[in-house]
Image: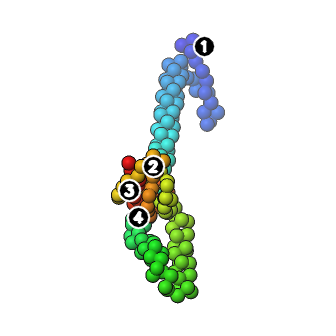
Amino acid sequence: MNEDDVVFEATEEGEGEALSKDKIKKLREDLKTAQAEKADYLASWQKERADFINYKKGEDERRKQIGEYARESFLEDLLPVLDGFDMAFGNTEAWEKVDKGWRSGIEYIHQQFVKVLEENGISQIAPNLGDTVDVSMHEVMDTMPTDDEVKEDTVSAVMQKGYKVKDRVVRPARVKAWKK
């Protein structure tokens, strides 16, 4: 072994220990292996962390969808109540015969009811007469004949209001439309 082949290493006792080039080469290989393993572990950990973040996002989205479906289901249970209010208000002859104070109270309760629904992302689909029929929001139950091209495919009467939760239609508005 010549001078170039020997390296001294200090030990705890302060004595020098000779390391051969072979031993240094082996230590360098071990270091490279350890660094490669470290990089693999780091990459694996980062991938697992990203997967977990994506999982959490997916769970949040699923939870949100479950809430939306629950809201839709609840709205479907409330539709007959809302329809009852609309029928009561629509029968103007009978409605006008009822005591004015009582009518005001019922109208106020209806307004509160609609406000709570709106605050929870539920809105009415109540087309106006003459609006263009939108098949994604309106269900045409009947047609009325017309010779006027301007009236073609527009709402001639609203039979029942529709409802949607945010942008999702739960029940389309049921309408009559003008047709040639």
Q: Check disc 4 and give the amino acid type.
A: Met
In the image, 136 versus 45, the foreground residue is 136
Q: Which residue is mark 2?
A: 148
Q: Which residue is mark 3?
A: 144
Q: Check disc 1 and give the amino acid type.
A: Glu
Q: Which residue is mark 1?
A: 3
Q: Is residue 38 left or right of residue 15?
A: left
In the image, 52 versus 104, the foreground residue is 104
Q: CA distance from mark 4 to mark 3?
A: 13 Å
Vertical position of residue 36 compared to residue 134: above or below? above
Residue 118, position as x, y percentages in the image = 54, 65
Residue sitting at the far right: 14
Q: Which residue is mark 4?
A: 159
Point out the image quarter for the N terminus. Answer: top right
Q: Mark 2 or 3, which is nearer the eye?
A: 2
- At a point 55% along the width and 69% down the height, the residue shown is 115
In the image, 68 versus 30, the foreground residue is 68
Q: Callout 1 environment at 10 Å: few (<14), some (14 to 19), or many (20+)? A: few
- At a point 47% along the width and 34% down the height, the residue shown is 40
Can the viewer see residue 141 in this picture?
yes
Vertical position of residue 56 compared to residue 7: above or below? below
